[in-house]
Amino acid sequence: MSSRTPDHPVDPQFVSRWSPRAFGPAAMTEAQVMSLLEAARWAPSASNNQPARFAWGLRGDAAFATIHDGLMGFNTVWADKAAALIVVASKTFVEKDEGRAPNAWHAFDAGAAWMSLALQAQAMGLVAHAMGGFEADKLGPALGLPEGYQIQVVVAVGVQGDAAALPEKLQAREQASPRRPVAEVAGHGKLPA
Ligand SMILES: Cc1cc2nc3c(=O)[nH]c(=O)nc-3n(C[C@H](O)[C@H](O)[C@H](O)COP(=O)(O)O)c2cc1C
């Protein structure tokens, strides 16, 4: 996979993780979902506020249908084959004596939780694909999202399947993508543009 040759020595889990859209028929258990959420909850967060929240469903159950119904069309066409759908939301505020204060890091911390979840999925022989393409106005109310919380992504999880089963347009995109070189994104004492 030439597009995934690391510039520097790194644990292979980071380079081999990618986001397929083709899922196989294998189902997932609730216990497997709990392992993914277990990984997510150990993610670090600012002041250990732990703003990430999750809602999940397994293919075939009502929760899965609700979450799937809240996806945008370009995601519904493939995410219906996922074995589980997991919504990652975040609490945007913290409680203070004087009332609510915004938590500037809620989305950053939810992102850390998603990455932990994705790497745990990989360690379990599963694949995870995050989607920002959801209808917040529909999905939030359907899942009882409290005021002051935001949905960040919906994650499709399952066993990787055969790309040939995808709609033709998506088949060409079913491959691991490249990254900018470290030298382009990191500077010694200077932030690159
Ligand atoms: C916050 C976020 C939102 C994303 N939204 C979508 C989406 O709505 N639909 C989709 O097919 N992929 C989505 N992706 C997948 C990205 O396109 C993908 O992670 C990126 O191209 C890097 O590829 P890789 O994960 O295979 O390494 C999203 C990923 C992230 C992290």
Image: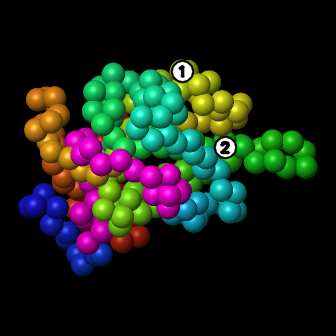
The disc at residue 64 is: none
Q: In this view, does 153 lie above or below 136?
A: below
Residue at numbered disc 1? 138
Mark positioned earlier in the residue sequence (2 or 1): 2
The quadrant in which the N terminus is found is bottom left
Asked whether mark 1 lies closer than 8 Å to ligand 1, one says no
Residue 75: image quadrant is top left
Return the residue at label 2.
Answer: 91
**Residue 29: percent from the left, percent from the top?**
45, 52
Q: Which residue lies furthest to the right in this view?
A: 97
Dot 2 crowding, Cα within 10 Å, few <14, some 14–19, many 20+: many
Q: Give the range drawn in magenta.
A: 12-37
Indicate the colouring scheme.
rainbow
Whether the residue under disc 2 has CB within 8 Å of ligand 1: no
Write the residue at 55% across / 62% down: 38
Classify 159 as above or below 137.
below
Query: Residue at horizontal 66%, vertical 30%?
Result: 144
Q: Which amino acid does label 1 sit on?
A: Lys
Can residue 123 be seen here? The reply is yes
Question: At 56% from the left edge and 54% from the top edge, which residue is drawn?
Answer: 109
Disc 2 versus disc 1: nearer the observer: 1
Residue nearer the viewer, 14 or 47: 14
Q: To which quarter of the image does residue 8 belong?
A: bottom left
Query: Please, what secondary structure does the residue beneath circle 1 have?
Result: helix
Q: Where is residue 3 in the image (x, y as percent from the top left)?
A: 13, 57
Residue 191 visible from this viewpoint: no
Left or right side of 28 for 144? right
Circle 2: residue type: Lys
Q: Quadrant of ligand 1?
A: top left
Graded by Cα atoms within 10 Å as few (under 14), some (14 to 19) or many (20 or more), the crowding at tag 1 reads some
User: Image check: 128 left or right of 24?
Assistant: right
